[in-house]
Image: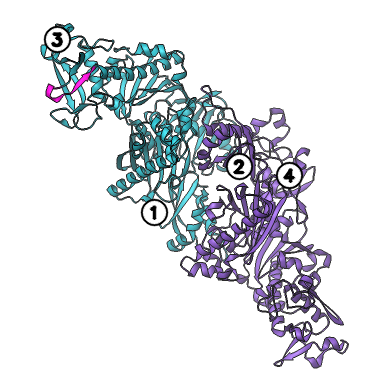
Chain colours: A purple, B cyan
Amino acid sequence: MTHRITFLPQHRTASTPDGASILSAANWAGIPIETICGGRGTCGQCKVRMREGAGPAAETDRRFLDAAQLEDGWRLACCATVHADCVVEAPSGSSEPPVALPGSGRSVALDPNVCKVHLELAQPSLADPRSYLTRVLDALRAAGYEPRAVPNVSRALPAVLRHGAFDITAVICGDEWIAVEAGDTTDRNYGLALDLGTTTVVGTLVNLKTGVIEAVESLLNAQATYGADVIARIGYATLHEGGLAALQSRIAGTVNQLVEAAGAKCGVPRENIYEAVAVGNATMLHLLLGVDPAPIGVSPFVPAFQQALTLPAADAGLRLHPEARLSTLPLVGAYVGADVVAGLLATDGVRRADGKLRLYLDVGTNTEIVLGRDDRYLATAAPAGPAFEGAQIRCGMRAASGAIEGLAIDGNVWLRIVGGLPRPVGICGSGLVDAVAELLRCGLLEPSGRFVRPDAVPGRLPAALADRLILQDGIPGFLLSAPEDGIILTQADVRALQLAKAAIASGTQVLMKRLGVRTEDLDEVLLAGSFGSYLNPASARAIGLVPDVPLERITAVGNAAGEGAKIALLSRAEREAARQMPQHVEPVELSGHPQFNSVFTDALALGRA
Amino acid sequence: MTHRITFLPQHRTASTPDGASILSAANWAGIPIETICGGRGTCGQCKVRMREGAGPAAETDRRFLDAAQLEDGWRLACCATVHADCVVEAPSGSSEPPVALPGSGRSVALDPNVCKVHLELAQPSLADPRSYLTRVLDALRAAGYEPRAVPNVSRALPAVLRHGAFDITAVICGDEWIAVEAGDTTDRNYGLALDLGTTTVVGTLVNLKTGVIEAVESLLNAQATYGADVIARIGYATLHEGGLAALQSRIAGTVNQLVEAAGAKCGVPRENIYEAVAVGNATMLHLLLGVDPAPIGVSPFVPAFQQALTLPAADAGLRLHPEARLSTLPLVGAYVGADVVAGLLATDGVRRADGKLRLYLDVGTNTEIVLGRDDRYLATAAPAGPAFEGAQIRCGMRAASGAIEGLAIDGNVWLRIVGGLPRPVGICGSGLVDAVAELLRCGLLEPSGRFVRPDAVPGRLPAALADRLILQDGIPGFLLSAPEDGIILTQADVRALQLAKAAIASGTQVLMKRLGVRTEDLDEVLLAGSFGSYLNPASARAIGLVPDVPLERITAVGNAAGEGAKIALLSRAEREAARQMPQHVEPVELSGHPQFNSVFTDALALGRA
């Protein structure tokens, strides 16, 4: 059962499950409501006025609101729960976030999960013999915090209080008090956003006081020596004695290298990094946490865990502050991971109950597809294979220096080469899509994916172009550059791209059928991921990789997963929204879908769909 | 602000702070109310009917109670809070504890903090792709538990679910899910009660399923090589590089030896011990947790922590189940420790709002004194010195084989010797108190503590007795046994006992003055601790060690601290009562008390007081 909740003065509405708190509904709707305590009912900051649908006042309401206010509909947003459609007025002070940060075109109120609280404590006396721990907890409670103290805090207190003469800073991460430092250290508060790709790991060091990004570093995932894709990694973890531990230690090592490199660049010591937020596919998160990913690899394909977890970062071998926390975002399913949740958070589509139908594609070896509107989304993963990464393509390569990344045919063949090199050394995924789209457009490729025979080239084409169509061992191919460069697009390459395209297109179609929508209903197509961002939308549409919608509805949204990790690091409200995301996204397993095979066969054909 | 709460059908009343839950008030009053979830509002078991003083129904009430029931005053005891005097009816089903256990003459409902929950899970399928972690959490929720999972649970799940074919047992400790085991292991559930004395450590291995005690072991505290008393230990921890770590490792080693010995005796492997509850003085608990005890040793004498803490037992070096928890009971102050809280829990006096005035004495080198009635108690510690342990007494010894533990004078001198030996080898504390009391009674000692001169022995005394009064180097003494045994009570020994007795008696008197009560008001005097239990109440009263009350009001209650640790291990409700205990007990620091010196001087005199 869900209810409609409308926030004033924004007049923004959201649908919310029965029994949810107003605060979590506001987080979900992206309405900023200030809290100090993060919704634990201890700070009294999150007062809202329920214009319609108010329930009875709770105990906690009475602590912070008087009878007249209660009568007038005022409640604490963290305690009031939704049991009917309601209208909620959030006071104007709440609608101005203290600091804003751009993230895929959106701004986020700075409200990190890690808080540093500076406290000047009264010294103990015979008249006030409270223990060290009690006097800090009392001071924290007065400041609106009621955290659980980790054991090391009690161990650190005697020396820190002595050294700091009872002038100290407590470090709170979520609902845990993780550290205590002498003096006022509130200026030194950093977090780490981690985007754990199967191939590449990106770490962003963020200043949690200012929201400023201090350093971004990326490294190849050191697990790569144990296999290129998730299936290979799962196999290694499952079949080799100590395989899981080896993979865990590799990813921890990669992250530690990133932290060292980032720290060297901006001068932030790892002791001042108190939290890491990690996103990635299900397998990467399992391996980071040292959890056996075997169940992901076999039918019925379930992860060992799917919820957002928080654990000591040291427990995963990460060298940050010794008590730093590592938090993951949730998974939707075994093949729709936290990277997708982060991407949906960053692009902010799922939460806008604006009736628009959205398609989100994170194009890659495993392409995640999300389709829906308002609070119902479907998600699946299409095994596109490594063609987009340049693998199993004769002259394929990654988008590195010398790769053809863009191509246009106009009497001649025009190349855009990574690094601006004069001659290409290979072709990467976006170039491949352009090449096939352009060859299709000018009639050198048939919609079936077959090259036309050299003797059947349309007469209107210039000879310079027609001459590039060659036969090798009787099989046609197309010279992408001067013959001496040897950069050829082969018939097999086109077949590989067709299979990849068909996987994505048929995944999209299955979701559209399941949701009962048609291509013309699509309001937005979002292309995410490093590959998706470089893709030419017109070419993607021309070969049928994305549905046939007007080009202005197709948007490249960049590395949305990484952006989502940063957003979750900077805002508790956004992180809470990410936690709730899987409730709104239903995973669909393609291999179990009865229509998939016929849809797939149809989708092999090239052309607008 | 406190309110009066009356429980029906027992008609037992308690006073409770404003805003406390009915459940915690019931725990405090010793009224058994069944819960599965331990008061987290998730199981709906703790329904009670508020006959008077009901507040508005909470959200959680509505989940488990219908409108008619709410109207009729039914509420969940864990959610309903007290804001006025009230009358609460607990359903009769709740008043029958499943298993009872004797503890200092009281019975305790078996409701341990560690629960084993056997679950037969549905296997994953394409139609039910919930993660392993989710399907266990869902099953636990259905059973009334909503714990936080520790990271190692996610790590263990894939192998345990595979191995157990989805038939598993989850181990819940407090609000944490700490372990998962294949199959039904609910029969194997053990806990460890630890009484950490400065000299002796006692470990009791308890079967948490049946409440049966499987083994009791005691060992000398291996810290003893670093000092005999807490002041010496604090000095060692503070002044020696690595001293704290050495002391921590010694006490952990002692506990691990106890566990090994107990396990060997009853066949319980340490992997099946999921929780340890530790009590002891403040210094012992600081050292066990590796927290610098320095602030305990210097004015104004405050502990680093005083609250009940829970941490991974492995974090303190204890080798139990790898994820076992270690919980401490709270301290009242730097010198009124968790041993006193445990003792008050075991003797159940503080919670009975029966108007009786009680004095609790745990007699030892540091004697804890608690005095009060209803919900106001005062506590202090008197530095009695080591006389009761036989130290600094010429023929003093511990209560080991050959020690005079009891003595009566009746024309002759009658001895009770530990182990039934024919001849004594020394005298222990209880013998010392008897000796001084008897010599005082028959006129060989003056109330000032001086032996009468041999030439001034009352003529009515038999010669056999008078002849035992001897002079050594001109100083009088008393032959406790045949001259060839050489067991003499010296004038210095009597002085040592006088100082110890004066410390305790003056501490008691300060508390009585502070509370405004007189000796004749005392309803109960409880003598706790291994020494207190062996003490002859008549002798203790005769020399003025305890106030001059009728003998039937003086009770030896045994090792109440150790009993309290066991009770806290076996019952969450009792542990919650222990957590609340310090709110009802106000520590009084004798050294800061203006009247102490004059009271102490007066208390040096021997005789009923």
Nearest the viewer among A458 and A299 is A458
Q: CA distance from mark 1 to mark 4?
A: 48 Å
Q: Earlier in the sequence, mark 2 or mark 4?
A: 4
Q: Which residue is mark 1?
A: B185
Are the residues flagged by discs 1 and 2 in contact, CB closer than 8 Å?
no
Nearest the viewer among A11 and A200 is A200
Q: Position of residue B336 (x, y in %)?
A: 43, 27
Are the residues flagged by discs 1 and 4 in contact, CB closer than 8 Å?
no
Secondary-structure class at tag 4 = loop
Question: On the picture, is A73 further left or further right than B552?
Answer: right
Q: Which residue is mark 2?
A: A172
When the figure is inspected, residue B519 is found, relative to residue B319, above or below; the finding is above
Q: Position of residue B308 (x, y in %)?
A: 47, 36
Q: Nearer the viewer, mark 3 or mark 1?
A: 3
Q: Residue at x 39, y 12 (%)?
A: B599
Callouts 2 and 3 in the same chain: no
Three-letter residue code for mark 4: Pro
Three-letter residue code for mark 3: Leu
